[in-house]
């Protein structure tokens, strides 16, 4: 089984949708979906008919053709366990409620997605077989943008692109904070998965304020101040009264978020992006030590990235441009290619935000600290025109791009990508140990250390892109095994993932301990006794 | 808040900016049911990769419309798949025809 290369595609002629399966789009496209454990073929047919009555024939999918775009995934799935059995796309809260009632009656599990673009974590595919994708993309209203409070209230199907277009159209000088696939991803979906961006508002859940949630019994609950009659404070005050419950609806399966409030950053009068270039792989520990006090004190206010050279190269290059030998690409080969592109082995990106005066006051302090770490401090003046600098300078002001999809072409056209993202405290000695362990495990399987570190505030995310050829079944199996070994062995050192893809949710949940898992199960049984919402999400059933 | 380290003059400037904002922006927006033009859809989705050193150039190559539609719905290789809930059938037909007949853009660079 092999994917189509560009040349073959260009010669496809009038192949069309009907012939797509024969063109080798993917193995999973032909996988026969499995029904959920408590759903018979006859009851599945009945529930589909009832759902069609709610949303219309055009928005319920259970055939091979209609489900193809829901099955597309970058993560390893050698046993074809992550294949949806159907999909339904409502356009309103009332339609969501009706679907939930039908699902409860037939015990049909629903896997909710906002835009389904969680690339590298499973896209729209479910954690277990037999689930129907509840696709909220059609719920795409921007309900409110308050330019005075700098807040927004949006539905799950709104993309960052749509919200940016709205701000542009209305000339509202507020910035978004985007993940690396902002144009096609949803602020709601990314925030609910506790994703990050790269401005001072980079920890998306921190800047979330108020939700509307359809509960498994069909009730609609608003969190924070949203349940107060005549409230005008829903997007202004996060905590409300009593237990703070918004976190229960992130990385979980306790409800379906149908509206979410978020805070937006006022566009600062002055924005200055920087890159610090370090020459050696071992330099990352010194960078973290230099960066931590600046970040903890918010002298550097944004989520900053220390990008490894191979990760950077993989965005705009094919692996064969850098390394054609056996096994993992060597540091020497990566360093040579990086140098040819004005990159170091570590390239640290951060920015200063404020007024000309405040940036000018802070710049000498951060320059001094980072120069002392052995890095070259570079700005637009030196790096203007460099595509990597441009990429990060765009991200750090909340600008939209899809440059990082290029990672999935590192191993040719195969399109395999799985993010492994363990967290650690922001301390240099942790990086040295983590990098050594990652390189050892990846090297055992012949994969490359395409990785970065990010300092959120006090924590360090090690962001490892496991890049493989998904059209090669043997390599897909190898990637699956490699990923599991990384999760397990990092976990043994106390480094667990902050987020993971559908193939490894149980594995990561087990690392957080049985008491925690039992507590989640207790909540699940109370809130969703028939287990219809996303069984297996974060290892919760 | 993260702006705690900003000087008071900086905050005053932020406030000044906020006061000039249009009040109409507060009104609730209608549902986004209007189909996007082929040019807008290309610029805000396809064009981020195709022509910007990520994916291959697709303009100016007379690519067949059915093949474009198949690739968009299936997600060929490293490309994401796009569902009808994201790009409607009508929008897809329009953008595929536009891509198929458009001239090459010298500003684009493929990979």
Image (spheres, rainbow, N blue to C red):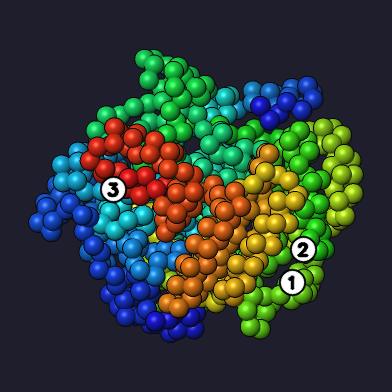
Q: Is residue A420 left or right of residue A68?
A: right
Q: Residues within 10 Å of mark 3 (few under 14, many from 20)?
A: many
Pointer 2: what residue?
A281
Q: Residue at x 53, y 71 (%)?
A: A468
Q: Is residue A308 visible?
A: yes
Chain at numbered mark 1: A
Question: What is the secondary structure assignment of the residue under circle 3?
Answer: strand
A468 vs A188: above or below? below
For discs 1 and 3, the disc positioned in front in the rendered view: 1
Quarter holding the C terminus of chain A is top left
Q: Residues within 10 Å of mark 1 (few under 14, many from 20)?
A: some
Q: Nearer the viewer, residue B82 or A514?
A: A514
Q: Residue at x 64, y 32 (%)?
A: A266
Chain at numbered mark 3: A
Q: Are marks 2 and 3 on the same chain?
A: yes
Q: Nearer the viewer, residue A444 or B20?
A: A444
Chain at numbered mark 2: A
Task: Return the mark for residue A110.
Answer: 3
Pointer 1: what residue?
A331
């Amino acid at each position: 089984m092999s994917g189509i290369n560009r040349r073959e595609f260009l010669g496809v002629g009038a192949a069309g949708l009907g012939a797509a399966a024969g063109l080798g789009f993917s193995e999973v496209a032909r996988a026969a979906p499995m029904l959920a454990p408590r759903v018979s073929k006859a009851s599945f047919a009945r529930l589909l008919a009832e759902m069609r009555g709610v949303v219309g024939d055009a928005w319920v999918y259970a055939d091979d053709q209609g489900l193809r775009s829901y099955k597309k995934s970058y993560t390893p799935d050698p046993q074809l366990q992550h294949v949806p059995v159907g999909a339904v796309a409502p356009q309103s809260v009332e339609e969501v409620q009706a679907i939930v009632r039908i699902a409860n009656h037939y015990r049909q599990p629903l896997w909710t997605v906002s835009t389904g673009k969680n690339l590298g974590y499973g896209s729209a595919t479910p954690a277990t077989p037999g689930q129907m994708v509840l696709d909220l993309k059609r719920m795409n209203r921007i309900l409110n943008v308050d330019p005075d409070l700098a807040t927004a209230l949006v539905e799950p199907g709104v993309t960052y692109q749509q919200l940016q277009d709205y701000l542009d159209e209305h000339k509202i000088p507020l910035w978004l904070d985007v993940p690396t696939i902002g144009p096609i991803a949803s602020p709601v979906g990314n925030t609910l998965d506790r994703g990050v961006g790269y401005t001072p508002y980079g920890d998306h859940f921190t800047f979330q304020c108020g939700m509307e949630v359809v509960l498994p019994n069909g009730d609609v609950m608003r969190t924070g101040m949203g349940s107060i009659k005549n409230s005008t404070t829903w997007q202004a005050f996060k905590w409300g009264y009593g237990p703070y419950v918004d976190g229960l609806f992130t990385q979980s399966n306790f409800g379906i978020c149908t509206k979410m409030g978020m805070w937006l950053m006022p566009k600062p009068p002055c924005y200055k992006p920087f890159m610090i270039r370090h020459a050696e792989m071992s330099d990352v520990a010194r960078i973290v030590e230099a960066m931590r006090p600046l970040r903890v004190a918010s002298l550097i206010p944004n989520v900053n990235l220390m990008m490894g050279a191979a990760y950077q190269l993989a965005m705009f290059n094919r692996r064969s441009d850098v390394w054609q030998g056996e096994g993992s690409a060597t540091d020497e080969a990566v360093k040579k290619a990086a140098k040819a592109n004005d990159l170091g082995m570590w390239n640290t990106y951060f920015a200063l935000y404020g007024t000309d005066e405040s940036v000018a006051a802070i710049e000498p302090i951060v320059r001094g600290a980072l120069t002392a770490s052995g890095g070259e401090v570079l700005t637009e003046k030196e790096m203007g025109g460099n595509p990597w600098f441009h990429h990060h300078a765009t991200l750090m002001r909340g600008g939209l791009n899809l440059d990082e999809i290029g990672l999935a072409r590192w191993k040719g056209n195969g399109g395999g990508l799985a993010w492994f993202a363990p967290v650690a405290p922001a301390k240099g000695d942790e990086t040295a140990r983590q990098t050594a362990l990652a390189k050892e495990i990846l090297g055992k399987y012949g994969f490359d250390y395409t990785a970065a570190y990010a300092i959120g505030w006090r924590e360090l995310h090690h962001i490892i892109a496991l890049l493989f050829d998904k059209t090669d079944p043997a390599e897909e199996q190898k990637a699956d095994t490699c990923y599991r070994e990384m999760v397990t062995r990092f976990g043994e050192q106390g480094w667990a993932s902050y987020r993971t893809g559908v193939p490894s949710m149980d594995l990561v949940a087990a690392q957080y301990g049985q008491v925690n898992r039992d507590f989640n199960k207790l909540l699940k049984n109370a809130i969703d006794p028939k287990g219809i919402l996303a069984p297996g999400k974060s290892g919760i059933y | 808040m993260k702006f705690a380290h900003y000087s008071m003059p900086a905050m005053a400037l932020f406030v000044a900016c906020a006061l000039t904002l249009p009040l109409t922006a507060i009104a609730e927006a209608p549902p986004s049911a209007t189909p996007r033009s082929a040019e807008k859809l290309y610029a805000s989705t396809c064009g981020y990769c195709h022509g910007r050193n990520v994916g291959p150039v697709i303009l100016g190559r007379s690519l067949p419309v059915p093949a474009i539609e198949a690739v968009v719905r299936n997600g060929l290789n490293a490309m994401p798949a796009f569902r009808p809930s994201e790009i409607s059938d009508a929008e897809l037909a329009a953008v595929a025809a536009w891509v198929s007949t458009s001239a090459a853009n010298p500003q684009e660079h493929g990979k």
